[in-house]
Image (cartoon, helix red, strand yellow):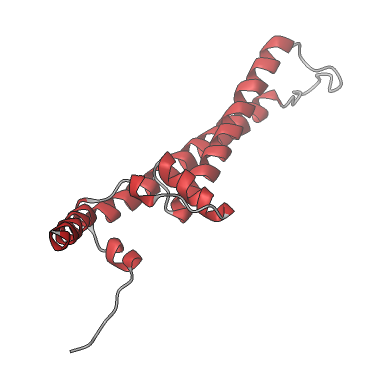
């Protein structure tokens, strides 16, 4: 028989919960991408609508009247949409790459990145991992008696 050694990461990659988790991360990123693309398209359409193209025999140096408040509100909405879409794409893409789904995981990985090891027992586990941990704890408790 081949003694094939699997790491913890490879074993967890085969579980059903892991696949669902990665799919959820992917969908979050794609929704953020769709929001960004829609915001870009709306901003592009808004810019095309503001372009002044005079017809034949119209003055080309005198643009039509417009509302300053309307322009400011439109710019605020379009800029907010673009910034929000870009930021959410960056956040969800980074979390997808780093395999982060919850805030406790984010804080754990950030602490580990900064050099502070924290207790990993507070992180959520999938059902298979929790069953294995419970069995090991039962074995250790039985040995002590």
Q: Residue furthest right?
A: 61
Considering only vertical position in the picture, is 138 above or below 8? above
Residue at 42% x, 53% y: name it: 99
Q: Is residue 57 left or right of residue 114?
A: right
* Residue 22 appearing in the image: yes
Of the 4 image quadrants, the one containing the C terminus is bottom left
Q: Nearer the viewer, residue 104 or 43?
A: 104
Rendering coords of residue 134 (x, y %): 18, 54
Considering only vertical position in the picture, is 48 above or below 116? above
Residue at 28% x, 55% y: name it: 19
Which quadrant holds residue 62? top right
Q: Residue furthest front?
A: 145
Considering only vertical position in the picture, is 68 above or below 50? above
Q: Residue furthest bottom?
A: 1
Residue at 55% x, 45% y: name it: 90
* Residue 67 appearing in the image: no
Rendering coords of residue 100 (x, y %): 42, 49
Q: Nearer the viewer, residue 137 or 18?
A: 137
């Amino acid at each position: 028989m081949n003694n094939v050694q699997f790491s913890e990461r490879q074993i967890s990659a085969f579980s059903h919960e892991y696949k669902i988790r990665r799919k959820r991360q992917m969908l979050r990123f794609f929704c953020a991408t769709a929001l960004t693309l829609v915001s870009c398209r709306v901003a592009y359409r808004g810019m095309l609508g503001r372009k002044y193209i005079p017809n034949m025999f119209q003055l080309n140096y005198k643009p039509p009247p417009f509302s300053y408040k309307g322009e400011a509100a439109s710019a605020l909405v379009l800029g907010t949409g673009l910034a929000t879409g870009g930021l959410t794409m960056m956040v969800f893409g980074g979390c997808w790459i780093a395999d982060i789904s919850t805030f406790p995981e984010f804080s754990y990985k950030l602490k580990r990145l900064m050099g502070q090891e924290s207790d990993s027992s507070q992180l959520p586990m999938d059902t298979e991992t929790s069953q294995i941990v419970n069995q090991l704890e039962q074995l250790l408790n039985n040995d002590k008696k």
